[in-house]
């Protein structure tokens, strides 16, 4: 039933012969793959490891600048180069940001220690990474997604980043390279690794998780959230199991996921690969696999003989970190309102669902919208204008005067501007500011008085008796005909919805 | 040219008062090194020009009416695992070939800031792993008391430099006895301070949870002088204690009337009879000076050696991973990165270092961690508890520093286990993190020095030095 898939997964071609879809409802996420039907015979199980570079001024164990994009090996010192005799000193700001993450993810924030994770690699100056192992700073939390589902957080621990390698020659990988260049600017940059429980059931949910987590990390000032610069890096542990089973299958860790799009595609493809293996009577080998965005598949990473024994042991150069109750309280109190709570607040104010206001919160436009609603603007309209027109010009949004935005919405609510006019005025306000009333006047916009519109409508009904009969008979398609005529006659100054309402009113009366 | 020189303290006093120039003092010692070090090989590197320049700077300060500090003009030899800016720092290993640290260790800065003059870098067992200084890539150091004997180790070069009068003061590092044992074998004073009293920043790590920098001197007072200079909190070392003991020198003469001294039974069993006799005499002398001396049992100390030989190699296997040929020091090319790592480390490390890296790697391996490293850490906890129990009844504890006097060169180098036993008396203090020091106390039947070890509880340096001063006073000529 399927193409032969070799043990390393190399044989996974573009053709999909299996009959099942990745977990989740709705249409397949990736249209270029034929054969992805709606039937689900298996369930995808995903746990995510998100590495978050902390937005500190300096590195985790030294005073070097924590900055992206500087010339290679300019932000280095004896400590982050691991020179003989150097010793680490823990950055208190990094601890505080890690604690914020723990609190924001509802974790238990506790006394922790550092371990050394020993392995040889040229981007690791000491040939061990200082990380947290069995006593991490944050454990046992959860994250709520906009759709209301919860993903458990196993742990969120502090560790140092490695440098970065560039392998020159060969196929760009270390073993066949002619030579390699190493940049230690990133070595020692503080990271928090956030490990979810295997609670995620689809690529879509994985994307929602990362995007929600990203929003939280940005909101609390822990991260700049830039996946493309590597300040947020995601690895996915993917396994599959027959639908309805509660056993966990053998998982593979998929690396090199540089965007939400890669994450979603990689999970779907990896799950499909594993299911294909199982259907063919083969076994999934637990291994690290790399997502190849161009080829659209995962390829086997380390071979077995390179399996590492990290020989973890407590880092003797550092002392335990015990934040204490007072510091924890301080961090908890200083946390800003998180996206979930902000969605809840706006949804309540606007009379919409939390999912319906997610975009506005994600774009940080909720304060703007809330101000308008509390001044009497219609909630749904305020949300829509923000999510569509304001969102289309985020630079302008930063300059947008909330009072002017409110005034515009009120004009529209009162029928003094049509939707079309309001959008044009708003675009101008975003581009260059100004008072909505003056802008509308300058453009000659003036919503027509209701009586004037009614007169136009009655005239049209009289002029087009055939269409009117069809409208009365319930043919909604002719609504557009009448609205279009009125708009043309009034040069767009009438409110389309008001026209529709009038037509309905007339039809019921007649 | 020859000038009469007393102790380091007297020399510093004379320089500060302008009675002697630092330059004269340094020239005298450079001369002694030139004459004596061909035979002894205490130094890996003599910093003659740098020392003269530093001495001249001290003299200028004196001439300008300033006080250069408590070590004014006193030559200090540094174990060659202490980083010195721009000056080769080798750990007596080929793997660090060509490397010059871009910074000074905190202790080196402190010595210089106190007016001390660094005269050179001294030989050691490679990466401080050994008890005879025979494991040096640059050849062994000889004991100045008898050139056929080892000086002890791993700080054998520093001990020999002081014993030979080539430097009045020296710094070493002590992980399992590497200051105290060579001090005993060379007949000088050597101190391992409480863990955290002296900064480790710039000390090239062997076993981070055990390593501690400390002084060598000809007298207890000079050792106190140097420890007073190097002790102190260092924000660059996270394991540095906030309030280390200070002003040791001021209390040396306070006497030991009424102090309770325990002779540790477990550390006295199995030592050579002549060494045991000296310890007995030392106890009698302390009792004569007014102390109450009794035997005490500290049972867990007998497990110190095996615990140490798991913990120290485990940490070393990690600490020495960075010598991989990528960034500095020796690189031996290979076909790929793995081959380069292998070839570099095979060529760069000597056999004892390789042995300990393998031991430590094994002890930390999955499936063995708990049985080896975990068990050793539990023993460590036991040792601390047993010491605490003993210190409930005693102010200080004493034992021999080394079970033997200096042994002949080559006599143990083929037998690592016999060599490891040299540290049986000194290791427990490292595992506990407690201070301990060795004071010369007469000689053995072979006429070679015997050292008595004085141990104290955490931060107990003041009382430890008082007892050491009493021992020094009572020591047989
Ligand atoms: Zn740095």
Image (cartoon, helix red, strand yellow):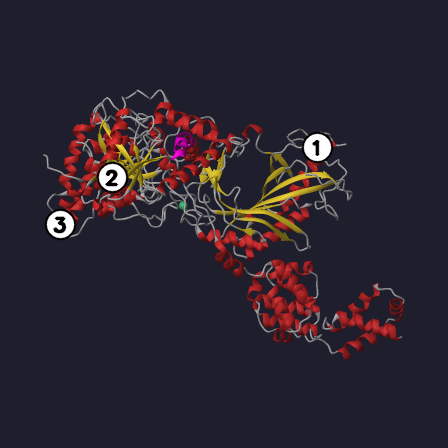
| Vertical placement of residue A412 versus A35, above or below | below
- Label 2, on which residue? B468
Please give left or right for residue B387 compared with residue A411 in the image. Answer: left
Number of the label disc, if any, that sits on residue B153: none
Q: Is residue A335 left or right of residue B23?
A: right
Q: State whether residue B109 appears in this view.
A: no
Bounds of the magenta segment: B298-307
SS for dot 1: helix
Find ligand 1 in the image and state its quadrant. top left
Who is closer to the viewer here, A24 or B332? A24
Task: Report whether residue B173 is seen.
Answer: yes
Image quadrant containing the N terminus of chain A: top right
Tag on residue B63? 3
Badge 3, how many Cα within 10 Å: few under 14, some, many 20+?
some
Asked if labels 3 and 1 share a chain, the reply is: no
- Callout 3 touching callout 1 (CB < 8 Å): no
Q: Is residue A86 above or below residue B280?
A: below
Q: Is residue A233 left or right of residue B440?
A: right
**Could you say which quadrant of the image residue B416 lies in?**
top left
* Earlier residue among tags 2 and 3: 3
Say which of B32 and A424 sits in front.
B32
Location of residue B425 in the rendering, given as x and y in whole percent from the top left corner? 34, 31
């Amino acid at each position: 039933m399927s193409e032969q898939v070799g043990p390393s997964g190399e044989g996974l071609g573009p053709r999909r012969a299996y009959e099942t879809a990745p977990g989740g409802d709705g249409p397949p996420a990736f249209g270029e793959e034929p054969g992805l039907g709606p039937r689900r015979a298996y369930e995808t199980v995903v746990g995510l490891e998100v590495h978050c570079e902390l937005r500190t001024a300096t590195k985790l164990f030294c005073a070097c600048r924590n900055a992206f994009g500087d010339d290679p090996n300019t932000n280095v010192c004896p400590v982050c180069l691991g020179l003989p005799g150097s010793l680490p000193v823990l950055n208190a700001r990094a601890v505080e940001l890690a604690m914020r993450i723990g609190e924001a993810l509802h974790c238990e924030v506790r006394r922790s220690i550092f371990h050394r994770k020993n392995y040889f690699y040229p981007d690791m100056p000491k040939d061990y990474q200082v990380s947290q192992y069995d006593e991490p700073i944050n454990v046992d939390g959860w994250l709520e997604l906009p759709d209301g589902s919860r993903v458990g957080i196993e742990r969120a621990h502090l560790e140092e980043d490695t440098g970065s390698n560039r392998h020159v020659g060969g196929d760009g990988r270390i073993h066949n390279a002619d030579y390699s260049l190493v940049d230690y600017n990133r070595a020692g940059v503080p990271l928090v690794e956030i490990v979810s429980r295997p609670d995620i059931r689809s690529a879509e949910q994985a994307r929602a998780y990362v995007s929600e987590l990203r929003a939280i990390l940005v909101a609390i000032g822990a991260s700049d959230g830039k996946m493309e610069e590597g300040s947020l890096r995601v690895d996915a542990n993917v396994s599959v199991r027959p639908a309805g089973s509660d056993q966990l299958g053998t998982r593979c860790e998929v690396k090199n996921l540089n965007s939400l799009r890669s994450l979603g595609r990689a999970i779907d493809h990896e799950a499909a690969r594993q299911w294909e293996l199982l259907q063919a009577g083969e076994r999934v080998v637990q291994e690290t696999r790399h997502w190849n965005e161009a080829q659209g598949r995962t390829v086997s990473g380390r071979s077995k003989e390179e399996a590492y024994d990290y020989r973890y042991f407590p880092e003797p150069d550092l002392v335990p970190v015990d934040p204490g109750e007072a510091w924890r309280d301080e961090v908890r109190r200083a946390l800003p309102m998180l996206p979930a709570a902000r969605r809840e607040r706006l949804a309540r104010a606007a009379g919409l669902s939390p999912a319906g206001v997610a975009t506005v919160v994600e774009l940080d436009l909720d304060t703007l919208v809330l101000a308008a609603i509390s001044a009497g603007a219609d909630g749904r309209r305020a949300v829509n204008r923000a999510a569509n027109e304001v969102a289309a010009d985020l630079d302008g949004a930063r300059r947008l005067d909330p009072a002017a935005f409110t005034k515009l919405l009120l004009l529209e609510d009162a029928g003094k501007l049509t939707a079309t006019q309001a959008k044009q005025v708003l675009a101008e306000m975003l581009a260059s500011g100004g008072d909505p009333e003056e802008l509308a006047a300058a453009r000659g916009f003036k919503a027509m008085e209701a009586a004037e519109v009614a007169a136009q409508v009655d005239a049209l009904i009289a002029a087009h008796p055939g269409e009117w009969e069809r409208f009365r008979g319930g043919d909604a398609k002719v609504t557009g005909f009448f609205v279009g005529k009125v708009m043309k006659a009034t040069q767009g100054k009438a409110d389309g919805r008001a026209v529709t309402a009038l037509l309905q009113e007339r039809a019921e009366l007649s | 040219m020859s000038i009469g020189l007393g102790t380091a303290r007297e020399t510093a006093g004379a320089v500060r008062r302008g009675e002697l120039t630092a330059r004269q003092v340094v020239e005298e010692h450079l001369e002694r090194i030139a004459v004596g070090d061909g035979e002894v090989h205490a130094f890996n590197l003599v910093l003659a020009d740098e020392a003269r320049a530093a001495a001249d700077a001290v003299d200028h300060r004196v001439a300008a009416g300033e006080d250069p500090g408590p070590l004014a003009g006193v030559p200090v030899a540094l174990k060659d695992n202490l980083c010195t800016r721009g000056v080769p720092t080798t750990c007596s290993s080929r793997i660090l070939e060509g490397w010059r640290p871009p910074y000074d260790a905190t202790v080196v800065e402190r010595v210089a800031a106190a007016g001390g003059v660094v005269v050179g870098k001294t030989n050691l067992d490679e990466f401080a792993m050994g008890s005879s200084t025979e494991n040096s890539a640059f050849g062994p150091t000889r004991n100045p008391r008898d050139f056929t004997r080892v000086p002890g180790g791993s700080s054998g070069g520093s001990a020999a430099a002081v014993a030979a009068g080539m430097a009045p003061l020296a710094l070493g590092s002590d992980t399992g006895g590497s200051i105290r044992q060579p001090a005993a074998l060379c007949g000088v004073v050597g101190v391992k301070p409480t863990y955290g009293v002296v900064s480790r920043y710039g000390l090239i790590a062997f076993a981070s949870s055990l390593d501690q920098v400390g002084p060598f001197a000809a007298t207890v007072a000079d050792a106190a002088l140097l420890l007073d200079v190097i002790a102190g909190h260092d924000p660059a070392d996270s394991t540095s204690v906030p309030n280390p003991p200070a002003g040791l020198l001021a209390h040396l003469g306070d006497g030991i009337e009424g102090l309770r001294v325990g002779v540790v039974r477990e550390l006295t069993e199995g030592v050579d009879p002549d060494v045991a006799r000296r310890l007995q005499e030392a106890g009698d002398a302390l009792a004569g000076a007014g102390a109450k001396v009794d035997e005490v049992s500290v049972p867990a100390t007998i497990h110190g050696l095996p615990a140490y030989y798991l913990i120290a190699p485990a940490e070393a296997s990690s600490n020495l991973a960075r010598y991989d040929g990528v960034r500095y020091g020796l690189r031996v090319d290979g076909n790929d990165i793995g081959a380069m790592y292998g070839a570099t480390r095979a060529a760069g490390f000597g056999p004892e270092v390789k042995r300990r890296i393998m031991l430590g790697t094994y002890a930390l391996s999955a499936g063995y961690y708990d049985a080896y490293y975990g068990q050793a850490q539990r023993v460590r906890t036991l040792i601390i508890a047993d010491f605490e129990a003993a210190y409930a009844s005693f102010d200080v504890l004493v034992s021999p520093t080394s079970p033997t006097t200096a042994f002949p060169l080559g006599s143990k180098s083929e037998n690592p286990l016999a060599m490891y036993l040299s540290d049986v008396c000194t290791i427990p203090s490292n595992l506990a993190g407690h201070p301990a020091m060795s004071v010369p106390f007469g000689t053995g039947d072979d006429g070679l020095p015997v050292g008595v070890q004085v141990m104290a509880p955490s931060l107990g340096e003041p009382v430890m030095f008082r007892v050491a001063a009493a021992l020094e006073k009572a020591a047989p000529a």
